[in-house]
């Protein structure tokens, strides 16, 4: 048993080195395939992050009348926060709103002057409400509508909210998110299938060159495991080497475009690569090894049929 | 030892036959030559014995074992009982003579010590001890065939199947190869050989089966080459 294993391992290594050109071709093709898969992973990550950021920017702004009492505001805020669809509620007081306004228009003389003309702070307190999922804003808006209907006309708390203005952009964004996720998934599947087919063909070629050896093996009564073993091992080695090569190619590229993604998406893809290196390594090398094993088994099956 | 029971092999949906109603047997320690024109069915006959080809009708037995009922997973074990020699040698060109022979033992899962002991013995039997570390490209045709014979016998098979072993060899090499096969037979191994060579048959003076168009037309105990 042990002798057999030792011989298979040795034959695998010898086959790897003796057929250097074929090994090189297989590794080259597999590296490209794995690099494409890795690149798709990175693009997918960038898309996910930027979509998350877009989603965070979407919210409902609820404005209170200027005379609204603090305890009424607190009550509404608490009831909103209790809703399961609501992710976060941010409260901006009238004073904070004024400060923000001043900061925004500090270089605008006319705005500042007209603000000075008023005796009272004209700005309203507001709640910024974020939903867990974009399609849940409809329910939150409904809830706010109910609150507006319930409040007494003499002593209102809520002035208005701007859901309807944002509704269109929210809907568009929801559908874009869906389409982008589907598209990137489809692209990934197509690329993986292409990679599998190309690798399969290359390894078939590698095994074709060894068909004479396989026929002699069968002739002298070698068992199927003994014949398959070295080729499967070569497949594993192709996968390992290709996975590591693909990572080595990705490293400088991501290092180069990292600052660019930082600027554009507020997300440094290189930092993500480094932080999740173990996971990415396992995925790429794992896919490579599995691909190598499957390709070898498929390719050699036809020579073991008789 | 080997029994053919009414074996036929048909091609093209039964319109042409490679073998037709073949019935004969081979006893242990026999040396059987099968002769006939090209296409007479000699090679098909041998392929039946090593389970490379299956009959359309009839059965082939190795002792009490129906060869074509052996499950595929057990075929390698069965083939280890048979040594095979071919016209084109089928040696691995990137291995030395020693390694080619050792390879057959490795494939059978033999231990390293056994290999170190048995391979030189096999080489001695075919008189090639001094060429152990030469590659096939550095050997003559006769020497290559002797390496192939050494590989066939190194696992001590019950029977040697030789398909035109002298087909590519000059008369002297042919003589040497036949002498080695005879020696192996004298040591107790059954030999089945196909050949075209009249001189080989007449010199051997052993059993000759003559085939023509898929049928056995003669079966002589100490035959001569008659076509």
Image (cartoon, coloured by chain):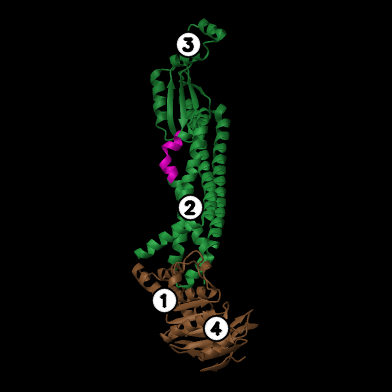
Chain colours: A green, B brown
Residue count near mark 2 (Cα–Cα under 10 Å), binned few <14, some 14–19, many ≥20: many
Chain containing the residue with disc 2 = A
Are the residues flagged by discs 1 and 2 in contact, CB closer than 8 Å? no
Name the residue rendered at 41%, 21% in the picture: A73
- Mark 1 or 4, nearer chain start: 1
Chain containing the residue with disc 4 = B
As drawn, the label of residue B135 is none
- Residue B222, compared with residue A54, is above or below; it is below
Name the residue rendered at 42%, 69% in the picture: B102
Are the residues flagged by discs 4 and 2 in contact, CB closer than 8 Å? no
Residue occupied by mark 4: B194
Measure the C-alpha gap from mark 3 to mark 2: 71 Å
Measure the C-alpha gap from mark 4 to mark 3: 113 Å
Residue occupied by mark 1: B124
- Residue A179, compared with residue B53, is above or below; it is above
Marks 1, 2: nearer the viewer: 1
Marks 1, 4: nearer the viewer: 1
B28 vs B216, left or right, is left
Q: Nearer the viewer, residue B74 or B76?
A: B76
Marks 1, 3: nearer the viewer: 1
Measure the C-alpha gap from mark 1 to mark 4: 25 Å
- Residue A131, compared with residue B156, is above or below; it is above
**Mark 1 on the same chain as mark 3:** no
Residue occupied by mark 3: A121
Marks 4, 3: nearer the viewer: 4
Residue occupied by mark 2: A238
Main secondary structure along the magenta-highlighted residues:
helix
**Is label 3 in a helix, a strand or a loop?**
loop
The residue range painted magenta reads: A271-281
Marks 4, 2: nearer the viewer: 4
């Amino acid at each position: 048993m042990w002798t057999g294993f030792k011989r298979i391992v040795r034959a695998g290594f010898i086959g790897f080195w003796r057929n250097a050109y074929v090994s090189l071709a297989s590794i080259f093709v597999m590296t490209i395939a794995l690099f494409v898969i890795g690149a798709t992973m990175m693009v997918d990550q960038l898309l996910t992050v930027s979509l998350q950021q877009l989603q965070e920017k979407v919210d409902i702004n609820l404005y209170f009348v200027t005379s609204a009492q603090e305890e009424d505001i607190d009550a509404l805020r608490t009831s909103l926060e209790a809703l399961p669809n609501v992710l976060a509620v941010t409260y901006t007081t009238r004073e904070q709103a004024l400060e923000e306004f001043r900061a925004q228009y500090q270089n605008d003389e006319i705005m500042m002057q007209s603000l000075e003309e008023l005796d009272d702070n004209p700005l309203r307190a507001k709640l910024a409400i974020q939903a867990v999922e974009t399609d849940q804003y409809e329910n939150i808006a409904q809830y706010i509508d109910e609150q507006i209907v319930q409040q007494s006309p003499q002593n209102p708390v809520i002035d208005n909210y701007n859901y309807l203005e944002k509704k269109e952009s929210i809907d568009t964004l929801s559908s874009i998110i869906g389409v982008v996720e589907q598209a990137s998934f489809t692209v990934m599947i197509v690329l993986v299938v292409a990679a599998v087919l190309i690798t399969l063909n290359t390894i078939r070629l590698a095994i074709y060159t060894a068909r004479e050896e396989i026929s002699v093996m069968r002739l002298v009564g070698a068992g199927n495991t003994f014949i398959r073993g070295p080729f499967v091992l070569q497949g594993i080695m192709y996968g390992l080497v290709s996975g590591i090569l693909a990572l080595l190619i990705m490293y400088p590229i991501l290092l180069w475009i990292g600052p660019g993604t930082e600027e554009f998406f507020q997300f440094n893809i290189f930092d993500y690569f480094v932080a999740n290196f173990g996971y990415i390594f396992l995925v790429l090398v794992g896919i490579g090894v599995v691909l190598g094993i499957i390709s070898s088994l498929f390719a050699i099956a036809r020579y073991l049929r008789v | 030892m080997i029994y053919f029971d009414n074996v036929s092999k048909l091609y093209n949906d039964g319109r042409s036959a490679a073998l037709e109603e073949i019935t004969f047997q081979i006893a242990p320690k026999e040396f059987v030559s099968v002769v006939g024109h090209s296409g007479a069915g000699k090679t098909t006959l041998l392929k039946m014995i090593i389970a490379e080809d299956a009959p359309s009708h009839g059965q082939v037995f190795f002792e009490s074992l129906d060869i074509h009922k052996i499950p595929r997973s057990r075929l390698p074990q069965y083939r280890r009982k048979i040594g095979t020699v071919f016209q084109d040698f089928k040696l691995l060109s990137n291995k030395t003579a020693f390694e080619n022979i050792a390879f057959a033992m490795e494939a059978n899962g033999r231990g390293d010590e056994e290999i170190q002991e048995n391979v030189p013995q096999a080489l001695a039997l075919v008189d090639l001890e001094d060429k152990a570390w030469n590659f096939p490209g550095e050997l003559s045709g006769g020497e290559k065939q002797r390496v192939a014979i050494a590989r066939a016998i190194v696992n001590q098979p019950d029977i040697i199947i030789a398909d035109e072993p002298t087909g590519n060899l000059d008369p002297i090499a042919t003589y040497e190869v036949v002498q080695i096969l005879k020696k192996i037979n004298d040591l107790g191994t059954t030999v089945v050989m196909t050949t075209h060579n009249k001189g080989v048959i007449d010199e051997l003076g052993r059993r000759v089966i003559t085939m023509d168009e898929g049928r056995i037309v003669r079966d002589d105990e100490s035959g001569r080459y008659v076509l």
